[in-house]
Image (cartoon, helix red, strand yellow):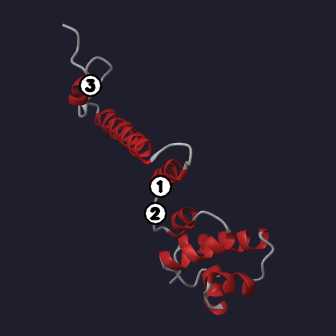
Amino acid sequence: MASLNVGNLGEYLREQRRTAQLSLRQLADAAGVSNPYLSQIERGLRKPSAEVLQQVAKALRISAETLYVRAGILDEKERDDLETRAVVLADPSINERQKQVLLQIYDSFRKENAAEAAAAENGTASGADAGSGPGAADAPPPPG
């Protein structure tokens, strides 16, 4: 039985294919998948693998991560994280060491924000004691 995500994926693929002005057959050939299989994906009858989605995304010249989210393979937050990392790693104006340092800083901020959000959700942190929660070891000691 087709899930909502798969149907949503199929509709999205059909829209992207039409925007690219490709026939079903042309997209199937470009992606290296069979025409009937691609048709079934568009109609929400099949859930393609990540590999097939990657091939289709490449043929459509769109982000594979977007298709992964539509298919329920990846959640929105993971996609944003992957896209951010891809942009940093693809930047030719910074060297490899700088890329790694930038990604480490990015990870640090994400962990800190996640810890703060979790603490706020649990009602365990306030403005006065926010520096004593998770990640506080990385912060300088309070003046005293």
Residue 11 in sight from this viewpoint: no
Q: Which residue appears farthest toward the top when viewing the image?
A: 144
Q: Which mark is residue 74?
A: 2
Examine the image and state in which quarter residue 39 appears: bottom right
Q: Which residue is mark 1?
A: 82
Examine the image and state in which quarter residue 13 appears: bottom right
Q: Which residue appears farthest toward the left when viewing the image?
A: 144
Expressed as whole percent of the image width and height from the top left, the position of residue 66 reads 57, 62
Which class describes the residues within 10 Å of circle 2: few (<14), some (14-19), or many (20+)? some
Q: From what the image shows, is residue 110 above or below residue 142?
A: below
The three-letter code of the residue at mark 2 reads Leu
Which class describes the residues within 10 Å of circle 3: few (<14), some (14-19), or many (20+)? few
Examine the image and state in which quarter residue 99 appears: top left
The three-letter code of the residue at mark 1 reads Leu
Helix, strand or loop under label 3: loop
Q: Alpha carbon of mark 1 to alpha carbon of mark 3: how far? A: 27 Å
Expressed as whole percent of the image width and height from the top left, the position of residue 138 reads 25, 29
Expressed as whole percent of the image width and height from the top left, the position of residue 113 reads 37, 36
Q: Is residue 113 left or right of residue 137?
A: right
Q: Is residue 129 left or right of residue 29?
A: left
Expressed as whole percent of the image width and height from the top left, the position of residue 115 reads 30, 37
Q: Which residue is mark 3?
A: 139
Helix, strand or loop under label 1: helix
Q: Earlier in the sequence, mark 1 or mark 3?
A: 1
Nearer to me, 80 or 29: 29
- In front: label 2 or label 3: 3
Helix, strand or loop under label 2: loop
